[in-house]
Image (spheres, grey):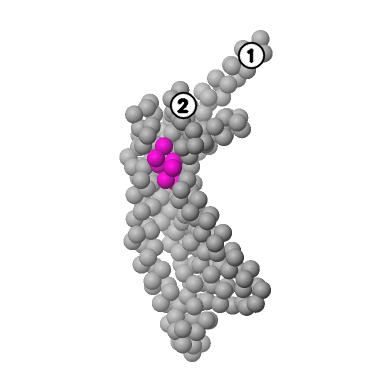
C-alpha cells in the first residue's frame, strides 16, 4: 500500500511539472547572447575605457597611463556594462525565451531535481519518459545563466578597478578575487552550453519548440 501511495505521489509531482512545462520554449538565447558579446559589449567597453582616460585627464589633470586613470576606466566599464547588460537582458534576452512563471523543478523532490539537472548538464543520459519536463528545465536554466552573464562583467571590472587603488597585502587579496571571478564566468558559460547541447540532443523527443540552442 505504501508503494502504491508513493508511486501515485510521484506521478502527481511529474504531472504538475509537465503542466508547468507547457509553453516553455527557447527562441534564440544563444544567438542573443552571442550578438551581445561579439558586438555590443566590445563597443561599449572600448568607449567606456577611453572615456575614463579622457575624464581623468580633463577633471584631474592626469596622464592616460596614470593608475587613477585605469581605476576610473575600469570603474566606468563596470557601471556601463551593468547598465547595458540589464537593458539588453530586458529587451533581447528575456524575449528570446518563454520560461513561464514558476520553476518546473519546484514541483519535484530534491533528488528528482538533482537527477534532472544532471541530465541537463550531460553528466548522465537523458530519460525519455519525462523529456518535456527536462527540456523545459533546460530552457529555464539557460535563461537564468544568460541573465547572470549580463551581470558578471560588472563584478570583474569593479574588482579590477580596485587593483589601482590598493597596495601591499590588500592588493594581493583583491588580485586573488579575479581568478575566482573568471572561474565562475567559465562555469556559467559551460553550463549554458551544456544545456544547449542537451536541447539539441533531445530535439527529436516529444517536447518544446526550440529555435536555437547555440
Q: Which residue is mark 1?
A: 3
Image quadrant holding the N terminus, namely top right
Q: Which residue is mark 2?
A: 127
Mark 1 residue element = helix
Residue 160 appears at what percent x and percent y?
53, 70
Observer-nearest residue: 111 or 172?
Answer: 172
Residue 194 appears at what percent x and percent y?
44, 42
| Camera-nearest label, 1 or 2 | 2
Q: Residue furthest top?
A: 1
The residue carrying pointer 1 sits among few (fewer than 14), some (14 to 19) or many (20 or more) residues within 10 Å by Cα, namely: few
Residue 152 appears at what percent x and percent y?
50, 58
Is residue 130 rendered magenta in the image?
no
In this picture, residue 196 sits left or right of residue 72: left
Observer-nearest residue: 73 or 89?
Answer: 73
Q: What residue is shown at x 38% (from left), y 46% (from top)?
A: 29
Image quadrant holding the C terminus, namely top left
Residue 40, by quadrant, is: bottom left
Write the start and end of the magenta stretch as one range.
Answer: 192-198
Which numbered disc flags the more N-terminal residue, 1 or 2? 1
How far apart are the two marked residues, 1 and 2, measured between alpha carbons? 22 Å
Residue 80 appears at what percent x and percent y?
46, 67
Whether residue 105 is situated above or below residue 72 in the rendered picture:
above
Amino acid at each position: 500500500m505504501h508503494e502504491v501511495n508513493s508511486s501515485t505521489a510521484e506521478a502527481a509531482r511529474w504531472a504538475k511539472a509537465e503542466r508547468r512545462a507547457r509553453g516553455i520554449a527557447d527562441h534564440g538565447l544563444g544567438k542573443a547572447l552571442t550578438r551581445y558579446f561579439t558586438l555590443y559589449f566590445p563597443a561599449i567597453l572600448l568607449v567606456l575605457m577611453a572615456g575614463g582616460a579622457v575624464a581623468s585627464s580633463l577633471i584631474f589633470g592626469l596622464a592616460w597611463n596614470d593608475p587613477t586613470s585605469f581605476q576610473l576606466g575600469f570603474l566606468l566599464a563596470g557601471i556601463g556594462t551593468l547598465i547595458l547588460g540589464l537593458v539588453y537582458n530586458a529587451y533581447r534576452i528575456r524575449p528570446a525565451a518563454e520560461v513561464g512563471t514558476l520553476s518546473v523543478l519546484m514541483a519535484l523532490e530534491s533528488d528528482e531535481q538533482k537527477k534532472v539537472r544532471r541530465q541537463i548538464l550531460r553528466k548522465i543520459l537523458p530519460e525519455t519518459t519525462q523529456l518535456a519536463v527536462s527540456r523545459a528545465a533546460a530552457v529555464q536554466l539557460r535563461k537564468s545563466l544568460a541573465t547572470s552573464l549580463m551581470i558578471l562583467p560588472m563584478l570583474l571590472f569593479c574588482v579590477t578597478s580596485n587593483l589601482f587603488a590598493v597596495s601591499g597585502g590588500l592588493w594581493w587579496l583583491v588580485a586573488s578575487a579575479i581568478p575566482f571571478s573568471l572561474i565562475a564566468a567559465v562555469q556559467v558559460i559551460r553550463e549554458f552550453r551544456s544545456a544547449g547541447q542537451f536541447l539539441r540532443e533531445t530535439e527529436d523527443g516529444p517536447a518544446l519548440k526550440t529555435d536555437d540552442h547555440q
